[in-house]
Image: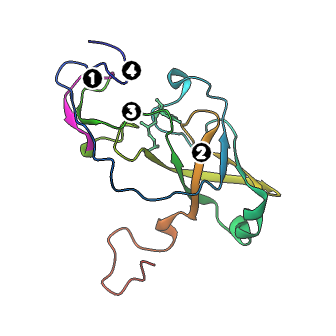
């Protein structure tokens, strides 16, 4: 079956009745503005030469950007708010090959957190202009961190500070 609605399944897909009793509270720090209005317009993964996007932080978080402009690359975490969350096996539209959720970077996952490495173009007050995102316009923003490869070697040394 084609389609991505909450109740539809493609060939090979399995959904579960996900446990709802344990939870954690996220605090969105702002919203992401992108030119992508529909999922079909979003790239599968962002491109560092893609369009300018805006990380619009709530004003109270502007001081938390102090020091950010010394980094060219940032990790951005966001909440893929339009995703279903109940699939354990998925058959992605691209190749239809049935694969486990945790072996995919699909937006469909129990906690639909997206992660992209972006290039920082400039800061405008509480807003960062970046390239490299793949999410829908108005996707909630969870966190921003300097890109980790700037801090740790790719194969971490046993004494490396991973904080
Ligand atoms: N780069 C992130 C990662 O690897 O964690 C996300 C990758 S995911 C494959 C990107 C896709 O998620 C987009 O192509 C689009 O189809 C979908 N998507 C984007 N924004 C979304 C949102 N707010 N809610 C649900 N799906 C979204």
Q: Quadrant of residue 144?
A: bottom right
* Mark nearer the N terminus (1 vs 4): 4
Disc 3: which residue:
84
* Mark nearer the N terminus (3 vs 4): 4
Point 70% across, 69% down: residue: 64
Residue 140: assigned label:
2
- Element carrying mark 4: loop
Residue 122 in the image: x percent, y percent? 76, 54
Which of labels 1 and 3 is toward the front? Answer: 3
Residue 107 in the image: x percent, y percent? 41, 37
- Asked if the beta carbon under badge 2 is closer than 8 A to the nearest atom of ligand 1, the reply is yes
- Element carrying mark 2: strand
Residue 49 in the image: x percent, y percent? 61, 40
Q: CA distance from mark 1 to mark 4?
A: 19 Å
Point 38% across, 20% down: residue: 5
Q: Quadrant of residue 29?
A: bottom right
Disc 1: which residue:
95
* Mark nearer the N terminus (1 vs 2): 1
* Residue 140 in the figure: left or right of residue 79: right
């Amino acid at each position: 079956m084609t389609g991505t609605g909450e109740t539809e399944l493609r060939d090979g897909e399995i959904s579960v009745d996900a446990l709802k009793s344990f939870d954690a509270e996220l605090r969105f720090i702002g919203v992401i503005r992108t030119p992508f209005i529909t999922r079909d317009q979003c790239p599968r993964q962002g491109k560092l030469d893609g369009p300018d996007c805006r990380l619009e932080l709530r004003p109270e978080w502007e001081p938390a950007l102090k020091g950010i402009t010394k980094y060219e690359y940032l990790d951005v975490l966001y909440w893929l708010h339009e995703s279903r969350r109940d699939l354990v096996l998925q058959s992605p539209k691209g190749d239809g090959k049935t694969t486990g959720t945790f072996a995919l970077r699909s937006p469909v996952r129990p906690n639909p957190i997206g992660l992209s490495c972006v290039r920082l173009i400039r800061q405008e007050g509480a807003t960062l202009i970046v390239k490299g995102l793949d999410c829908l316009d108005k996707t909630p923003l969870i966190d921003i961190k300097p890109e980790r490869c700037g801090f740790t070697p790719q194969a971490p040394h046993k004494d490396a500070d991973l904080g």
